Amino acid sequence: MSTILSDSQTDTDHPYPQSWVDRLLRWMQGLPVPVPALLVGIWIVLITIVHLTVWHEGILERGTIDRRVLMINTWIPYSLGFIYYLERTAAEALTAFRPALNMDEKTYAGLRYQFAVMPRRGVVISLVLGALLAYISLRMYPEISSPFMDTRLAAFVNMALSILGSAFIFVAIFMTYRQLRLIRQTYAHADRLDLFRSGELYAFSGLTLRMGIGWLIVVYAGVLFYPALVRNIPWAVTTGLVMAGIVVSFITTLFDIHKRIRTVKEDQLFEIDGRLQAAFSDLHRRIDSGDVEKLAPLREVMDALLVERGVVAKIPTWPWQPGTLAGFLAAVLLPLIGWGAQLLLQRLLGL
């Protein structure tokens, strides 16, 4: 599996150095073991550490597996995997979009670097914010992790891993915001966008879809396994604001891309209309002059232009194909429908 950036690309070649998270991922990519397998291994190590701790402290019976332990220790490998996956998907999308960009290779390499690498400062700030949120939440609402905070050793282990998990989640949030902004900027500079090359038009649709589904998993899984989080004011407010910001940025990105594609479409329709107008003017001139013997070839030209106009007019201007949009809406609505049906059944059955 190839890396996103070659080893020959050093920090001095680019406007900012790589964050340590990017360096960690590049190191993992250089190992003989696939990155997904490494992340699963990290998860197994984390849940083993926590279970051994709570068994030793007598919080759980030996051999008992707790689903909350499985869940809370998912966030570190999940966030790393999410960042890794977004970086790779972004690199593939940018490669597909390359023909639409009228820029030299050096400028393109810089853009590719920005998609693949996060700046150090943004990552550090994200880590600090995520760690603070977890610390404040656990101090104000210790019942969230009860009974895993009942002894000093268990509290230390679970507090440390919860803080790390929250910190890495915030890095993934930073990565999401950053890539959405870069997508908007990339489409804005696409001065060779071709409506008939769907690979360019929908190059970033897969990336935005994976972003949306990735964050839906975080929200739904958090509420499902830790329903007490909803009553945790710092967590609920922060999560609500962050998710609202992601949704706004997500929608803004889609609308910006939609406007860019629509502009290209309108320009092409305007050009076709101009040719049709010229053809009709030529037709009228020949009719007025009585030169009707060569109308058949002119009619063929006009028919071809009308066909072209009809094809262009039907090209959608949204950056998602209909099937992609349907998949995303299903991912959003199906869990909500299932959750609502469960609550309704519980109320009807008095559970």
Image (cartoon, helix red, strand yellow):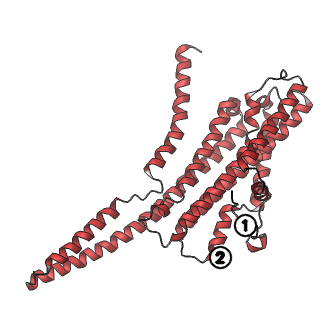
> Farthest residue in the front direction?
32
Q: Residue at x 82, y 25 (%)?
A: 147
Estimate the x, y position of residue 73 in percent, counting from the top left. 77, 38
Please state, as top left, top right, bottom left or bottom right, where the N terminus lies in the image.
bottom right
Q: Amino acid at mark 1?
A: Ser
Q: Which residue is mark 1?
A: 6
Using a 10 Å C-alpha cutoff, classify the residue at mark 1 as few (fewer than 14 neighbours), some (14 to 19) or many (20 or more): few
Q: Closer to the camera, 5 or 337?
A: 5
Q: CA distance from mark 2 to mark 1?
A: 15 Å
Does 178 appear above or below 130? below
Estimate the x, y position of residue 160 in percent, counting from the top left. 85, 40
Does 190 appear above or below 342? below
Picture quadrant where residue 281 is located: bottom left
Q: Residue at x 19, y 81 (%)?
A: 282
> Farthest residue in the bottom direction?
289
Using a 10 Å C-alpha cutoff, classify the residue at mark 2 as few (fewer than 14 neighbours), some (14 to 19) or many (20 or more): few
Q: Amino acid at mark 2?
A: Lys
As drawn, the label of residue 225 is none
Judge left or right: residue 289 versus residue 158.
left
**Mark 2 residue element:** helix
Q: Residue at x 80, y 42 (%)?
A: 163
Estimate the x, y position of residue 159 in percent, counting from the top left. 84, 38
Mark positioned earlier in the residue sequence (2 or 1): 1
Please state, as top left, top right, bottom left or bottom right, where the C terminus lies in the image.
top right
The mark lying in front, picked from 2 and 1, is: 1
**How many numbered marks appear?**
2
Does 5 appear above or below 29? below
Q: Residue at x 78, y 51 (%)?
A: 127
- Tell me if I can see residue 149 in this picture: no
**Mark 1 residue element:** loop
As drawn, the label of residue 106 is 2
